[in-house]
Image (cartoon, rainbow, N blue to C red):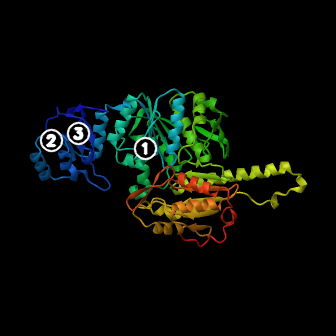
Protein backbone atom coordinates (compact mmCIF):
# COMPACT_ATOMS: atom_id res chain seq x y z
CA UNK A 1 0.00 0.00 0.00
CA UNK A 2 1.79 3.11 -1.25
CA UNK A 3 1.10 6.35 0.62
CA UNK A 4 2.53 9.82 0.21
CA UNK A 5 1.90 13.00 2.17
CA UNK A 6 3.55 16.35 2.89
CA UNK A 7 4.97 16.81 6.38
CA UNK A 8 2.81 19.90 6.93
CA UNK A 9 -0.32 17.75 6.60
CA UNK A 10 0.55 15.44 9.50
CA UNK A 11 1.66 18.05 12.06
CA UNK A 12 -0.09 19.13 15.26
CA UNK A 13 -0.03 22.70 16.51
CA UNK A 14 2.30 22.11 19.46
CA UNK A 15 5.04 20.40 17.39
CA UNK A 16 8.36 22.28 17.31
CA UNK A 17 9.47 21.93 13.68
CA UNK A 18 12.85 22.76 12.15
CA UNK A 19 13.10 22.22 8.41
CA UNK A 20 11.10 22.18 5.19
CA UNK A 21 7.52 21.05 5.93
CA UNK A 22 6.71 20.86 2.18
CA UNK A 23 8.80 17.67 1.91
CA UNK A 24 6.84 14.48 1.21
CA UNK A 25 7.08 11.42 3.45
CA UNK A 26 6.31 7.91 2.19
CA UNK A 27 5.94 6.07 5.51
CA UNK A 28 5.85 6.34 9.31
CA UNK A 29 8.29 4.07 11.16
CA UNK A 30 9.13 3.48 14.83
CA UNK A 31 11.84 0.83 14.29
CA UNK A 32 14.98 2.17 12.62
CA UNK A 33 15.59 -1.23 11.00
CA UNK A 34 12.41 -0.82 8.97
CA UNK A 35 13.19 2.68 7.72
CA UNK A 36 13.38 3.19 3.96
CA UNK A 37 14.18 6.21 1.86
CA UNK A 38 11.56 8.93 2.32
CA UNK A 39 10.23 7.71 5.68
CA UNK A 40 9.52 9.65 8.86
CA UNK A 41 11.04 8.05 11.97
CA UNK A 42 9.52 8.46 15.44
CA UNK A 43 11.87 7.80 18.35
CA UNK A 44 9.65 5.83 20.74
CA UNK A 45 10.81 4.62 24.13
CA UNK A 46 10.02 0.89 24.23
CA UNK A 47 10.17 -1.67 27.04
CA UNK A 48 13.70 -2.73 26.08
CA UNK A 49 15.05 -0.03 23.75
CA UNK A 50 14.88 3.73 23.35
CA UNK A 51 14.38 4.91 19.78
CA UNK A 52 16.40 8.06 20.50
CA UNK A 53 19.52 5.87 20.46
CA UNK A 54 18.76 4.89 16.86
CA UNK A 55 18.08 8.29 15.30
CA UNK A 56 21.32 8.34 13.33
CA UNK A 57 20.71 4.78 12.14
CA UNK A 58 17.29 5.90 10.82
CA UNK A 59 18.92 8.84 9.03
CA UNK A 60 21.50 6.58 7.41
CA UNK A 61 18.72 4.32 6.17
CA UNK A 62 16.96 7.20 4.41
CA UNK A 63 14.65 8.93 6.90
CA UNK A 64 13.81 12.47 5.78
CA UNK A 65 12.16 13.52 9.07
CA UNK A 66 12.77 12.66 12.72
CA UNK A 67 10.26 13.01 15.54
CA UNK A 68 11.92 13.12 18.97
CA UNK A 69 10.79 13.72 22.53
CA UNK A 70 12.12 17.05 23.76
CA UNK A 71 12.72 15.78 27.28
CA UNK A 72 14.64 12.72 26.05
CA UNK A 73 17.66 14.52 24.58
CA UNK A 74 19.44 17.68 25.69
CA UNK A 75 19.43 20.94 23.77
CA UNK A 76 23.11 20.37 23.04
CA UNK A 77 22.41 16.91 21.58
CA UNK A 78 19.52 18.14 19.43
CA UNK A 79 21.61 21.09 18.17
CA UNK A 80 24.47 18.73 17.27
CA UNK A 81 22.12 16.40 15.36
CA UNK A 82 20.56 19.29 13.46
CA UNK A 83 23.98 20.67 12.52
CA UNK A 84 25.21 17.24 11.43
CA UNK A 85 22.08 16.51 9.36
CA UNK A 86 20.79 19.90 8.15
CA UNK A 87 18.61 18.41 5.38
CA UNK A 88 16.52 16.41 7.85
CA UNK A 89 13.23 17.83 9.17
CA UNK A 90 13.43 17.78 12.98
CA UNK A 91 10.16 17.63 14.91
CA UNK A 92 10.29 18.06 18.69
CA UNK A 93 7.27 16.84 20.68
CA UNK A 94 6.29 16.44 24.32
CA UNK A 95 5.11 12.82 23.95
CA UNK A 96 6.34 10.62 21.11
CA UNK A 97 3.64 7.99 21.63
CA UNK A 98 0.90 10.59 21.34
CA UNK A 99 2.70 12.11 18.36
CA UNK A 100 3.10 8.84 16.44
CA UNK A 101 -0.59 8.03 17.00
CA UNK A 102 -1.63 11.45 15.69
CA UNK A 103 0.80 11.37 12.76
CA UNK A 104 -0.28 7.84 11.77
CA UNK A 105 -3.96 8.76 11.99
CA UNK A 106 -3.37 11.70 9.64
CA UNK A 107 -0.91 9.93 7.33
CA UNK A 108 -3.40 7.14 6.60
CA UNK A 109 -6.16 9.71 6.01
CA UNK A 110 -8.16 9.20 9.22
CA UNK A 111 -9.50 5.75 8.33
CA UNK A 112 -11.68 5.30 11.42
CA UNK A 113 -13.83 8.23 10.26
CA UNK A 114 -14.86 6.16 7.22
CA UNK A 115 -15.51 2.79 8.91
CA UNK A 116 -17.48 1.61 11.92
CA UNK A 117 -14.81 0.46 14.38
CA UNK A 118 -15.87 -1.87 17.21
CA UNK A 119 -13.31 -2.14 20.04
CA UNK A 120 -13.31 -4.94 22.62
CA UNK A 121 -11.34 -4.70 25.85
CA UNK A 122 -11.18 -6.83 28.99
CA UNK A 123 -9.05 -9.56 30.51
CA UNK A 124 -10.93 -12.51 28.98
CA UNK A 125 -13.33 -13.09 26.12
CA UNK A 126 -12.03 -10.54 23.62
CA UNK A 127 -11.10 -12.99 20.87
CA UNK A 128 -14.28 -15.07 20.90
CA UNK A 129 -16.42 -11.94 21.06
CA UNK A 130 -14.59 -10.48 18.06
CA UNK A 131 -15.34 -13.58 15.97
CA UNK A 132 -19.00 -13.56 17.02
CA UNK A 133 -19.41 -9.92 15.97
CA UNK A 134 -17.56 -10.57 12.71
CA UNK A 135 -19.93 -13.44 11.94
CA UNK A 136 -23.01 -11.31 12.68
CA UNK A 137 -21.77 -8.44 10.51
CA UNK A 138 -20.96 -10.77 7.62
CA UNK A 139 -24.41 -12.33 7.88
CA UNK A 140 -25.69 -8.75 7.61
CA UNK A 141 -23.84 -8.48 4.30
CA UNK A 142 -20.97 -6.27 5.44
CA UNK A 143 -17.28 -6.45 4.57
CA UNK A 144 -15.43 -6.97 7.86
CA UNK A 145 -11.85 -6.60 9.02
CA UNK A 146 -10.62 -8.15 12.27
CA UNK A 147 -7.58 -7.24 14.37
CA UNK A 148 -6.84 -9.59 17.24
CA UNK A 149 -4.69 -12.03 19.16
CA UNK A 150 -4.89 -14.96 16.77
CA UNK A 151 -4.69 -13.22 13.42
CA UNK A 152 -5.52 -10.11 11.43
CA UNK A 153 -8.27 -10.71 8.87
CA UNK A 154 -9.12 -8.50 5.92
CA UNK A 155 -12.39 -10.16 4.95
CA UNK A 156 -11.20 -13.78 4.59
CA UNK A 157 -7.50 -13.06 3.98
CA UNK A 158 -5.40 -13.79 7.09
CA UNK A 159 -2.16 -12.12 8.20
CA UNK A 160 0.14 -12.91 11.12
CA UNK A 161 -0.70 -11.10 14.37
CA UNK A 162 2.54 -10.26 16.22
CA UNK A 163 0.57 -8.19 18.77
CA UNK A 164 -3.05 -8.29 19.96
CA UNK A 165 -3.19 -4.59 19.10
CA UNK A 166 -0.37 -3.37 16.83
CA UNK A 167 1.60 -0.12 17.20
CA UNK A 168 -0.24 2.95 15.90
CA UNK A 169 1.40 3.16 12.42
CA UNK A 170 0.61 -0.53 11.81
CA UNK A 171 -2.88 -0.19 13.31
CA UNK A 172 -3.83 2.80 11.16
CA UNK A 173 -2.27 1.15 8.08
CA UNK A 174 -4.42 -1.94 8.71
CA UNK A 175 -7.55 0.20 9.00
CA UNK A 176 -6.75 1.91 5.70
CA UNK A 177 -5.96 -1.43 4.02
CA UNK A 178 -9.27 -2.83 5.25
CA UNK A 179 -11.17 0.17 3.92
CA UNK A 180 -9.46 -0.11 0.55
CA UNK A 181 -10.43 -3.79 0.43
CA UNK A 182 -14.10 -2.92 0.92
CA UNK A 183 -14.51 -3.36 4.68
CA UNK A 184 -17.22 -1.12 6.10
CA UNK A 185 -16.71 -2.46 9.64
CA UNK A 186 -13.63 -3.32 11.69
CA UNK A 187 -13.70 -5.43 14.84
CA UNK A 188 -10.59 -5.08 16.98
CA UNK A 189 -9.35 -6.37 20.29
CA UNK A 190 -7.94 -3.48 22.31
CA UNK A 191 -5.36 -4.59 24.87
CA UNK A 192 -4.53 -2.69 28.06
CA UNK A 193 -0.94 -2.34 26.82
CA UNK A 194 -2.15 -0.62 23.66
CA UNK A 195 -4.36 1.76 25.61
CA UNK A 196 -1.54 2.62 28.02
CA UNK A 197 0.84 3.16 25.11
CA UNK A 198 -1.69 5.15 23.03
CA UNK A 199 -1.51 2.76 20.06
CA UNK A 200 -5.17 3.33 19.16
CA UNK A 201 -5.37 7.01 20.12
CA UNK A 202 -7.16 9.30 17.64
CA UNK A 203 -9.18 6.32 16.39
CA UNK A 204 -12.94 6.92 16.45
CA UNK A 205 -14.71 3.91 17.97
CA UNK A 206 -18.38 3.39 17.14
CA UNK A 207 -18.85 0.68 19.78
CA UNK A 208 -16.69 -0.12 22.83
CA UNK A 209 -17.14 -3.41 24.72
CA UNK A 210 -15.96 -4.22 28.26
CA UNK A 211 -15.91 -7.98 28.93
CA UNK A 212 -14.44 -8.18 32.46
CA UNK A 213 -11.37 -7.33 34.51
CA UNK A 214 -9.40 -9.85 36.53
CA UNK A 215 -5.78 -10.13 37.58
CA UNK A 216 -3.38 -10.10 34.62
CA UNK A 217 -0.48 -8.03 33.27
CA UNK A 218 0.42 -6.68 36.71
CA UNK A 219 4.06 -6.98 35.71
CA UNK A 220 3.24 -4.08 33.37
CA UNK A 221 0.47 -2.15 35.15
CA UNK A 222 1.67 -2.78 38.72
CA UNK A 223 -1.81 -2.35 40.26
CA UNK A 224 -5.39 -3.33 39.39
CA UNK A 225 -6.30 0.36 39.58
CA UNK A 226 -3.79 1.22 36.84
CA UNK A 227 -5.01 -1.77 34.83
CA UNK A 228 -8.63 -0.57 35.08
CA UNK A 229 -7.75 3.02 34.24
CA UNK A 230 -6.01 1.85 31.08
CA UNK A 231 -9.13 -0.07 30.00
CA UNK A 232 -11.42 2.84 30.86
CA UNK A 233 -9.66 5.11 28.32
CA UNK A 234 -11.41 3.28 25.49
CA UNK A 235 -14.74 4.54 26.82
CA UNK A 236 -13.87 7.94 28.25
CA UNK A 237 -11.44 9.20 25.58
CA UNK A 238 -11.81 7.19 22.37
CA UNK A 239 -15.50 6.32 22.00
CA UNK A 240 -17.41 8.53 19.55
CA UNK A 241 -19.78 11.07 21.06
CA UNK A 242 -22.76 9.17 19.67
CA UNK A 243 -21.16 5.76 20.16
CA UNK A 244 -22.33 2.87 22.34
CA UNK A 245 -20.68 1.37 25.43
CA UNK A 246 -21.42 -2.34 25.97
CA UNK A 247 -20.56 -3.47 29.51
CA UNK A 248 -20.67 -6.69 31.53
CA UNK A 249 -22.79 -5.77 34.56
CA UNK A 250 -21.89 -8.98 36.43
CA UNK A 251 -18.30 -7.79 36.69
CA UNK A 252 -17.51 -5.42 39.62
CA UNK A 253 -15.27 -3.29 37.42
CA UNK A 254 -18.04 -3.29 34.81
CA UNK A 255 -20.44 -1.83 37.40
CA UNK A 256 -17.84 0.78 38.28
CA UNK A 257 -17.40 1.65 34.60
CA UNK A 258 -21.15 2.13 34.18
CA UNK A 259 -21.17 4.52 37.13
CA UNK A 260 -18.22 6.44 35.71
CA UNK A 261 -19.90 6.81 32.31
CA UNK A 262 -23.38 7.78 33.45
CA UNK A 263 -24.12 11.42 32.79
CA UNK A 264 -21.83 11.61 29.76
CA UNK A 265 -24.75 11.31 27.34
CA UNK A 266 -23.51 8.18 25.61
CA UNK A 267 -25.60 5.09 24.96
CA UNK A 268 -24.87 2.34 27.51
CA UNK A 269 -26.02 -1.27 27.07
CA UNK A 270 -25.36 -3.67 29.94
CA UNK A 271 -25.57 -7.46 29.89
CA UNK A 272 -25.41 -10.10 32.60
CA UNK A 273 -26.47 -13.51 33.80
CA UNK A 274 -26.84 -12.79 37.52
CA UNK A 275 -27.48 -9.02 37.64
CA UNK A 276 -31.16 -8.65 36.82
CA UNK A 277 -30.79 -4.87 36.61
CA UNK A 278 -28.81 -5.26 33.38
CA UNK A 279 -30.44 -4.23 30.11
CA UNK A 280 -30.15 -7.80 28.79
CA UNK A 281 -29.84 -10.98 30.84
CA UNK A 282 -29.65 -14.66 29.94
CA UNK A 283 -31.68 -17.41 31.59
CA UNK A 284 -32.65 -21.03 30.97
CA UNK A 285 -29.02 -21.70 30.04
CA UNK A 286 -28.30 -25.19 28.71
CA UNK A 287 -24.77 -26.25 27.81
CA UNK A 288 -23.52 -29.60 26.49
CA UNK A 289 -20.49 -30.99 24.68
CA UNK A 290 -22.20 -29.94 21.43
CA UNK A 291 -23.06 -26.34 22.24
CA UNK A 292 -25.07 -23.85 24.28
CA UNK A 293 -28.56 -22.39 24.28
CA UNK A 294 -30.30 -19.76 26.40
CA UNK A 295 -33.16 -17.28 26.42
CA UNK A 296 -33.08 -13.52 26.84
CA UNK A 297 -34.81 -11.20 29.26
CA UNK A 298 -34.73 -7.41 29.03
CA UNK A 299 -36.00 -4.60 31.24
CA UNK A 300 -35.89 -2.07 28.39
CA UNK A 301 -39.18 -1.20 26.70
CA UNK A 302 -37.23 -0.64 23.48
CA UNK A 303 -36.03 -4.26 23.51
CA UNK A 304 -39.21 -6.03 24.61
CA UNK A 305 -39.22 -8.16 21.44
CA UNK A 306 -36.13 -9.96 22.83
CA UNK A 307 -37.97 -11.38 25.83
CA UNK A 308 -37.78 -15.20 25.86
CA UNK A 309 -36.00 -15.18 22.49
CA UNK A 310 -34.04 -18.44 22.15
CA UNK A 311 -30.37 -18.32 21.06
CA UNK A 312 -28.25 -21.30 20.11
CA UNK A 313 -24.51 -21.60 19.47
CA UNK A 314 -21.94 -24.35 18.87
CA UNK A 315 -19.75 -22.59 21.46
CA UNK A 316 -19.58 -24.40 24.78
CA UNK A 317 -20.02 -23.19 28.35
CA UNK A 318 -21.40 -20.34 30.43
CA UNK A 319 -18.30 -18.26 29.69
CA UNK A 320 -19.41 -18.14 26.08
CA UNK A 321 -22.88 -17.01 27.13
CA UNK A 322 -21.20 -13.79 28.29
CA UNK A 323 -19.34 -13.50 24.98
CA UNK A 324 -22.55 -14.03 23.04
CA UNK A 325 -24.43 -11.50 25.17
CA UNK A 326 -21.78 -8.86 24.50
CA UNK A 327 -21.99 -9.51 20.76
CA UNK A 328 -25.80 -9.26 20.87
CA UNK A 329 -25.58 -5.87 22.59
CA UNK A 330 -22.97 -4.61 20.11
CA UNK A 331 -25.13 -5.74 17.19
CA UNK A 332 -28.25 -4.14 18.64
CA UNK A 333 -26.37 -0.85 19.06
CA UNK A 334 -25.65 -1.01 15.31
CA UNK A 335 -29.36 -1.63 14.59
CA UNK A 336 -28.80 -5.12 13.20
CA UNK A 337 -32.06 -7.13 12.99
CA UNK A 338 -32.49 -9.82 15.65
CA UNK A 339 -32.95 -12.53 13.00
CA UNK A 340 -29.53 -11.67 11.54
CA UNK A 341 -27.95 -11.62 15.03
CA UNK A 342 -29.28 -15.11 15.83
CA UNK A 343 -28.09 -16.54 12.51
CA UNK A 344 -24.66 -14.93 12.85
CA UNK A 345 -24.21 -16.38 16.34
CA UNK A 346 -25.34 -19.83 15.24
CA UNK A 347 -22.82 -19.72 12.38
CA UNK A 348 -19.83 -18.85 14.57
CA UNK A 349 -17.71 -21.98 14.77
CA UNK A 350 -15.16 -22.90 17.37
CA UNK A 351 -12.47 -20.25 17.77
CA UNK A 352 -8.89 -21.47 17.58
CA UNK A 353 -7.49 -22.11 21.03
CA UNK A 354 -10.69 -21.08 22.83
CA UNK A 355 -12.28 -24.21 24.28
CA UNK A 356 -11.17 -25.85 21.05
CA UNK A 357 -12.27 -29.48 20.98
CA UNK A 358 -9.83 -32.01 19.54
CA UNK A 359 -11.68 -35.11 18.34
CA UNK A 360 -9.98 -37.86 16.33
CA UNK A 361 -12.05 -40.75 17.58
CA UNK A 362 -11.14 -40.98 21.27
CA UNK A 363 -13.82 -41.73 23.85
CA UNK A 364 -13.07 -38.70 26.06
CA UNK A 365 -13.36 -34.95 25.53
CA UNK A 366 -10.04 -33.25 24.75
CA UNK A 367 -9.83 -29.44 24.82
CA UNK A 368 -7.16 -26.84 24.08
CA UNK A 369 -7.73 -23.44 25.69
CA UNK A 370 -5.84 -20.15 26.02
CA UNK A 371 -6.72 -19.69 29.72
CA UNK A 372 -3.58 -18.19 31.27
CA UNK A 373 -4.99 -16.14 34.14
CA UNK A 374 -6.51 -17.36 37.40
CA UNK A 375 -9.99 -16.16 36.39
CA UNK A 376 -9.80 -17.69 32.92
CA UNK A 377 -8.55 -21.00 34.34
CA UNK A 378 -11.37 -21.03 36.90
CA UNK A 379 -13.95 -20.33 34.18
CA UNK A 380 -12.49 -23.08 32.01
CA UNK A 381 -12.61 -25.61 34.84
CA UNK A 382 -16.12 -24.58 35.89
CA UNK A 383 -17.26 -25.05 32.29
CA UNK A 384 -15.66 -28.49 32.22
CA UNK A 385 -17.29 -29.35 35.56
CA UNK A 386 -20.73 -28.31 34.27
CA UNK A 387 -20.26 -30.40 31.13
CA UNK A 388 -19.14 -33.36 33.19
CA UNK A 389 -22.19 -33.15 35.45
CA UNK A 390 -24.46 -32.99 32.38
CA UNK A 391 -22.66 -35.99 30.90
CA UNK A 392 -23.01 -37.97 34.13
CA UNK A 393 -26.71 -37.17 34.33
CA UNK A 394 -27.25 -38.24 30.72
CA UNK A 395 -25.33 -41.48 31.28
CA UNK A 396 -27.36 -42.38 34.36
CA UNK A 397 -30.66 -41.45 32.71
CA UNK A 398 -29.88 -43.62 29.69
CA UNK A 399 -29.04 -46.60 31.90
CA UNK A 400 -32.21 -46.15 33.94
CA UNK A 401 -34.29 -46.19 30.77
CA UNK A 402 -32.66 -49.46 29.73
CA UNK A 403 -32.91 -51.16 33.13
CA UNK A 404 -35.83 -51.93 35.39
CA UNK A 405 -35.82 -49.41 38.22
CA UNK A 406 -35.88 -52.09 40.90
CA UNK A 407 -32.76 -53.68 39.39
CA UNK A 408 -30.71 -50.49 39.09
CA UNK A 409 -29.32 -48.32 41.85
CA UNK A 410 -27.63 -45.03 40.95
CA UNK A 411 -25.75 -45.07 44.25
CA UNK A 412 -24.07 -48.31 43.26
CA UNK A 413 -22.90 -46.97 39.88
CA UNK A 414 -19.27 -45.86 39.55
CA UNK A 415 -19.16 -42.11 39.00
CA UNK A 416 -17.97 -41.65 35.43
CA UNK A 417 -15.82 -38.85 34.18
CA UNK A 418 -12.76 -37.07 35.57
CA UNK A 419 -11.15 -33.74 34.74
CA UNK A 420 -7.44 -33.97 33.95
CA UNK A 421 -5.76 -30.57 33.55
CA UNK A 422 -2.37 -29.74 32.05
CA UNK A 423 -1.15 -26.19 32.64
CA UNK A 424 1.82 -23.98 33.47
CA UNK A 425 2.56 -20.25 33.83
CA UNK A 426 4.59 -17.92 31.65
CA UNK A 427 7.96 -16.60 32.70
CA UNK A 428 8.92 -12.92 33.10
CA UNK A 429 5.31 -12.10 33.92
CA UNK A 430 3.21 -11.53 37.03
CA UNK A 431 4.49 -14.08 39.57
CA UNK A 432 1.64 -13.39 41.99
CA UNK A 433 -0.92 -15.33 39.97
CA UNK A 434 1.07 -18.59 39.83
CA UNK A 435 0.21 -20.01 43.26
CA UNK A 436 -3.41 -18.92 42.83
CA UNK A 437 -3.64 -20.74 39.52
CA UNK A 438 -2.17 -23.82 41.18
CA UNK A 439 -4.78 -23.63 43.92
CA UNK A 440 -7.65 -23.27 41.42
CA UNK A 441 -6.40 -26.10 39.20
CA UNK A 442 -6.01 -28.54 42.10
CA UNK A 443 -9.40 -27.71 43.63
CA UNK A 444 -11.45 -27.90 40.45
CA UNK A 445 -9.63 -30.73 38.66
CA UNK A 446 -9.53 -34.38 39.62
CA UNK A 447 -5.91 -34.53 38.55
CA UNK A 448 -3.37 -31.90 37.47
CA UNK A 449 -0.15 -32.11 35.49
CA UNK A 450 1.98 -29.00 36.04
CA UNK A 451 4.27 -28.26 33.12
CA UNK A 452 6.05 -25.45 31.27
CA UNK A 453 4.19 -22.74 29.38
CA UNK A 454 6.47 -20.07 27.90
CA UNK A 455 9.24 -19.91 30.53
CA UNK A 456 10.99 -17.18 28.54
CA UNK A 457 14.13 -16.26 30.52
CA UNK A 458 13.07 -17.88 33.79
CA UNK A 459 13.82 -21.37 35.05
CA UNK A 460 10.85 -23.68 34.26
CA UNK A 461 11.37 -25.46 37.58
CA UNK A 462 11.32 -22.14 39.44
CA UNK A 463 7.99 -21.24 37.85
CA UNK A 464 6.60 -24.68 38.71
CA UNK A 465 7.71 -24.28 42.34
CA UNK A 466 5.75 -21.02 42.50
CA UNK A 467 2.66 -22.84 41.20
CA UNK A 468 3.07 -25.67 43.73
CA UNK A 469 2.96 -23.20 46.62
CA UNK A 470 -0.78 -22.82 46.09
CA UNK A 471 -1.59 -26.55 46.10
CA UNK A 472 -2.51 -28.25 49.37
CA UNK A 473 -3.42 -31.72 48.13
CA UNK A 474 -1.48 -34.40 46.28
CA UNK A 475 -3.67 -34.75 43.17
CA UNK A 476 -0.93 -33.55 40.86
CA UNK A 477 2.39 -34.41 39.27
CA UNK A 478 5.12 -32.31 37.69
CA UNK A 479 6.33 -32.93 34.14
CA UNK A 480 8.26 -29.88 32.85
CA UNK A 481 8.39 -31.16 29.25
CA UNK A 482 5.06 -29.94 27.83
CA UNK A 483 4.84 -32.59 25.12
CA UNK A 484 5.41 -35.38 27.64
CA UNK A 485 2.88 -33.80 30.02
CA UNK A 486 0.23 -33.78 27.30
CA UNK A 487 0.99 -37.39 26.44
CA UNK A 488 0.67 -38.36 30.09
CA UNK A 489 -2.75 -36.67 30.33
CA UNK A 490 -3.97 -38.68 27.35
CA UNK A 491 -2.61 -41.93 28.81
CA UNK A 492 -4.44 -41.22 32.08
CA UNK A 493 -7.77 -40.51 30.36
CA UNK A 494 -10.56 -43.03 30.00
CA UNK A 495 -14.10 -42.99 28.63
CA UNK A 496 -16.10 -39.96 29.77
CA UNK A 497 -13.11 -37.96 31.04
CA UNK A 498 -12.26 -34.39 30.07
CA UNK A 499 -8.64 -33.54 29.27
CA UNK A 500 -7.88 -29.81 29.38
CA UNK A 501 -4.65 -28.44 27.90
CA UNK A 502 -4.56 -24.86 29.16
CA UNK A 503 -2.44 -21.75 28.75
CA UNK A 504 -1.17 -21.51 25.18
CA UNK A 505 -4.28 -22.02 23.07
CA UNK A 506 -3.64 -20.92 19.49
CA UNK A 507 0.10 -20.27 19.98
CA UNK A 508 2.35 -22.28 17.68
CA UNK A 509 5.57 -21.80 19.64
CA UNK A 510 7.21 -22.17 23.02
CA UNK A 511 9.54 -19.37 24.15
CA UNK A 512 12.60 -20.59 26.06
CA UNK A 513 15.65 -18.46 26.90
CA UNK A 514 14.88 -15.83 24.30
CA UNK A 515 14.22 -18.29 21.47
CA UNK A 516 10.92 -19.44 20.01
CA UNK A 517 10.61 -23.14 19.20
CA UNK A 518 7.82 -24.62 17.10
CA UNK A 519 5.21 -26.09 19.43
CA UNK A 520 1.44 -26.46 19.17
CA UNK A 521 -0.74 -27.78 22.00
CA UNK A 522 -3.28 -29.00 19.46
CA UNK A 523 -0.68 -30.89 17.42
CA UNK A 524 0.88 -32.41 20.52
CA UNK A 525 -2.57 -33.46 21.76
CA UNK A 526 -3.58 -34.97 18.42
CA UNK A 527 -0.33 -36.95 18.22
CA UNK A 528 -0.75 -38.23 21.78
CA UNK A 529 -4.31 -39.37 21.11
CA UNK A 530 -3.29 -41.16 17.91
CA UNK A 531 -0.60 -43.02 19.80
CA UNK A 532 -3.02 -44.01 22.57
CA UNK A 533 -5.91 -45.23 20.43
CA UNK A 534 -5.98 -49.01 20.28
CA UNK A 535 -3.96 -49.72 23.39
CA UNK A 536 -4.82 -49.81 27.12
CA UNK A 537 -4.50 -46.48 28.92
CA UNK A 538 -1.82 -45.85 31.57
CA UNK A 539 -2.86 -46.89 35.04
CA UNK A 540 -6.34 -48.01 33.99
CA UNK A 541 -7.42 -44.54 32.94
CA UNK A 542 -8.63 -43.02 36.20
CA UNK A 543 -6.51 -44.79 38.80
CA UNK A 544 -3.73 -42.31 39.61
CA UNK A 545 -2.01 -44.37 42.30
CA UNK A 546 1.68 -44.60 41.72
CA UNK A 547 1.96 -41.31 39.85
CA UNK A 548 2.18 -39.01 42.87
CA UNK A 549 5.94 -38.72 42.97
CA UNK A 550 6.73 -38.37 39.27
CA UNK A 551 9.13 -35.44 38.75
CA UNK A 552 10.43 -35.48 35.21
Where residue 300 sits in the image (x, y, percent)? 59, 33
Element at label 2: loop
Is 1 placed left or right of 94 in the picture?
right
Q: Quadrant of residue 177?
A: top left
Closer to the N terminus: mark 1 or mark 2?
A: 2
Q: Nearer the viewer, residue 377 or 258?
A: 377
- Secondary structure type for disc 1: loop
Of tags 2 and 3, the one toward the viewer is 3
Q: Residue at x 65, y 72 (%)?
A: 546
Identify the residue position indicated by label 3 in the image. 39
Query: Could you tell me which residue is drawn at 80 percent across and 49 percent down?
Result: 398
Q: Nearer the viewer, residue 427 or 62?
A: 62
Residue 432 visible in image: yes
Residue 357 spot, x, y in % from top left: 60, 48
Marks 2 and 3 sit apart, C-alpha to C-alpha, by: 11 Å
Residue topped by disc 1: 190
Q: Earlier in the sequence, mark 2 or mark 3?
A: 3
The residue wearing badge 2 is 88
Q: Is residue 135 left or right of residue 539?
A: left
Percent position (x, y) of residue 529?
61, 55
Amino acid sequence: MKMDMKIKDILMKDFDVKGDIEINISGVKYDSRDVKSGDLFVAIKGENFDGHNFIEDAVRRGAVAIVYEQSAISNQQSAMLMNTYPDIVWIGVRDCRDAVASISHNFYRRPSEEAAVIGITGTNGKTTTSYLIKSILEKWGKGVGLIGTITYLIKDVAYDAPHTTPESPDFQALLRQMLDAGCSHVVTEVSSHSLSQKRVDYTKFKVAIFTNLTRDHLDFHQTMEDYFMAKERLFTELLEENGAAVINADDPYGERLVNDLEGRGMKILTYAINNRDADITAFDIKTTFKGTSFRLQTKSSELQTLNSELFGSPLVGVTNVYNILSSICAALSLNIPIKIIKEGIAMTGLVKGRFEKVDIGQDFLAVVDYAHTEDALERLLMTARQLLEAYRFAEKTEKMLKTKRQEYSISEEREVGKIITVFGCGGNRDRGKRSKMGEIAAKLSDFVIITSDNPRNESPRGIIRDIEKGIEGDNYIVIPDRSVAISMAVELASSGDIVLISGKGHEAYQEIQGRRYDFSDRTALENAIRRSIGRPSFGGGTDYKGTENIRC
